[in-house]
Image (spheres, rainbow, N blue to C red):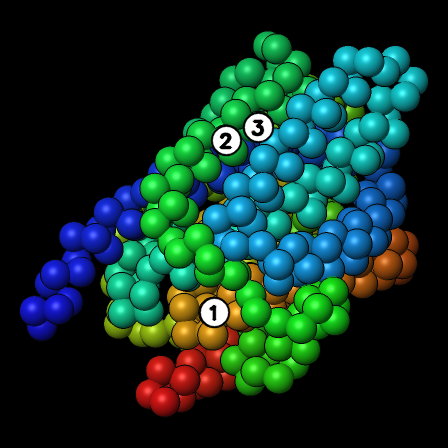
């Protein structure tokens, strides 16, 4: 190892440790909120859930340009702190409204909460990884992003376990207070990293018009970002199939809101336990040995195999609830253990002005746009027109195309790294 690399290694370890603690708090918070959100969203059935996905896109179209405009004007320190404070205060606002409204109005409040959390979950994670891409240089990212992701997974396990234990005991809405506190604790842990950045440094230095458009132009102009956007867009289809069918199965079980929250949290808990084992032993070595392209292809291939096998089980008439849950846990575990940290490594190669606005556009507009298209199609395909096994079989070639895009990302990444 060269002398200059040795001198920066202790600082890289310190940055990675603080980033891991920050990510622990972020994912603990989102893992508390996700089961509560899903419990509220499934109360009206799958058809209502599809409508909520469309409202999620509408809010994303409003929030993303506002965030891009803020990113173009604020120093990074102010951007990070104000963003997280705003989300935490909004969560406390929802909790106050829940206690201030009667039971007849809580369904509408629950739908609004579902839409907000769906945007927030992507937003806070996207902001975190943008900051990590700034703080950790590309040479260290291949080694450090795996342990950082493990910190996040441990947080997700903690959040899911807390919700599983406490949702029925204190009521699911009370979990919002814990989620807001965790966001603030994460920001506190990250404050030395944020203060160490140049206070004059802008997250972006773009013309105002482009910031207002969410910086989609940066995505279209960059070969790597275009392929990442295509990868994300294709990935929304298998994810939607998995999500909607699981929601239907849970809704058919006729559970209370708190019981549904506990069930969703239990599924998340076991998924995250499997994830942390994979991250601890495989993510770092796999990134170093095979590179991002091959690692990004793992999730599509696992999805194709899972949907094919569950489709065969459904076609054979077997009871599929727990088969489906196990298959979903495998897919989600692969997503968290390999796909997410691998994809974030790619952004360390992007120019600084691409790491916030363009990444935010991919993680919100592209992702939620794909979700909205799936939500529009699902009531026609998944509910009335096609049996479950046919939907699953039709998803397999889409997952294979998704894997092909991953290999193209790997090729562009090698060219960018060599440039």
Q: x, y (%) of residue 112? A: 81, 35
Which of the marked residues, 2 or 1, is nearer the chain's N terminus? Answer: 2
Query: Mark 1 and mark 3: span between their CA atoms?
Result: 29 Å
Residue 365 visible at all: no
Q: Secondary structure at mark 3?
A: helix
Tell me the residue that label 1 is attached to.
352
Where, by quadrant of the figure, is residue 117 drawn?
top right
Tell me the residue that label 2 is attached to.
184
Image quarter (top left, top right, bottom left or bottom right) of the C terminus: bottom left
Query: Mark 2 and mark 3: span between their CA atoms?
Result: 7 Å
For residue 59, above or below residue 339:
above
Mark 2 or 3: the one toward you:
2
Asked if the residue under mark 3 is in contact with the one under mark 2, i.e. CB atoms within 8 Å, the reply is yes
Q: Residue furthest top?
A: 169
Label disc, if present, on residue 180 of the rendered structure: 3
Query: Mark 2 and mark 1: span between their CA atoms?
Result: 26 Å
The residue at the point 69 percent across, 44 percent down is: 118
The residue at the point 7 percent across, 69 percent down is: 3
The residue at the point 15 percent across, 67 percent down is: 5
């Amino acid at each position: 190892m060269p002398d200059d690399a040795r001198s920066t290694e202790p600082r890289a370890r310190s940055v990675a440790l603080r980033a891991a603690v920050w990510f622990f708090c972020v994912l603990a918070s989102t893992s508390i909120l996700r089961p509560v959100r899903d419990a509220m969203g499934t109360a009206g059935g799958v058809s209502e859930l599809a409508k909520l996905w469309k409202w999620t896109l509408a809010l994303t179209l409003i929030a993303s340009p506002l965030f891009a405009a803020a990113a173009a004007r604020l120093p990074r320190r102010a951007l990070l702190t104000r963003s997280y404070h705003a989300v935490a205060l909004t969560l406390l606002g929802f909790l106050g409204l829940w206690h201030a409204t009667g039971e007849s109005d809580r369904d509408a409040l629950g739908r609004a909460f579902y839409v907000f959390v769906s945007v927030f979950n992507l937003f806070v994670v996207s902001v975190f990884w943008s900051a990590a891409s700034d703080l950790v240089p590309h040479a260290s990212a291949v080694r450090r992003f795996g342990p950082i992701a493990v910190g996040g997974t441990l947080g997700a396990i903690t959040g899911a376990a807390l919700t599983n234990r406490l949702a029925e005991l204190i009521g699911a809405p009370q979990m919002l207070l814990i989620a807001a506190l965790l966001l603030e604790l994460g920001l506190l842990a990250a404050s030395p990293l944020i203060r160490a950045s140049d206070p004059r440094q802008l997250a972006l230095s773009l013309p105002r018009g482009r910031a207002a458009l969410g910086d989609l132009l940066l995505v279209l102009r960059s070969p790597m970002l275009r392929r990442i956007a295509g990868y994300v867009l294709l990935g929304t289809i298998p994810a939607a199939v998995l999500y909607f069918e699981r929601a239907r199965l849970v809704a058919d079980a006729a559970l209370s809101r708190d019981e549904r929250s506990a069930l969703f949290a239990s599924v998340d808990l076991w998924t995250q336990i499997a994830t942390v084992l994979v991250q601890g032993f495989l993510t770092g070595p796999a990134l170093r040995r095979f590179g991002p392209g091959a690692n990004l292809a793992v999730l599509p291939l696992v999805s194709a195999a899972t949907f094919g096998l569950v489709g065969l089980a459904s076609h054979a008439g077997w009871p599929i609830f727990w088969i489906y849950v196990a298959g979903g846990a495998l897919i989600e575990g692969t997503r968290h253990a390999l796909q997410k940290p691998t994809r974030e490594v790619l952004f360390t190669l992007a120019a600084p002005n691409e790491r916030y606005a363009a990444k935010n556009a991919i993680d919100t507009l592209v992702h939620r746009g794909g979700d909205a298209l799936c939500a529009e199609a699902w009531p026609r395909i998944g509910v009335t027109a096609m049996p479950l096994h046919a939907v699953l079989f039709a998803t397999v070639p889409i997952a294979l195309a998704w894997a092909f895009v991953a290999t193209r990302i790997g090729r562009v990444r090698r060219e960018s790294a060599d440039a």
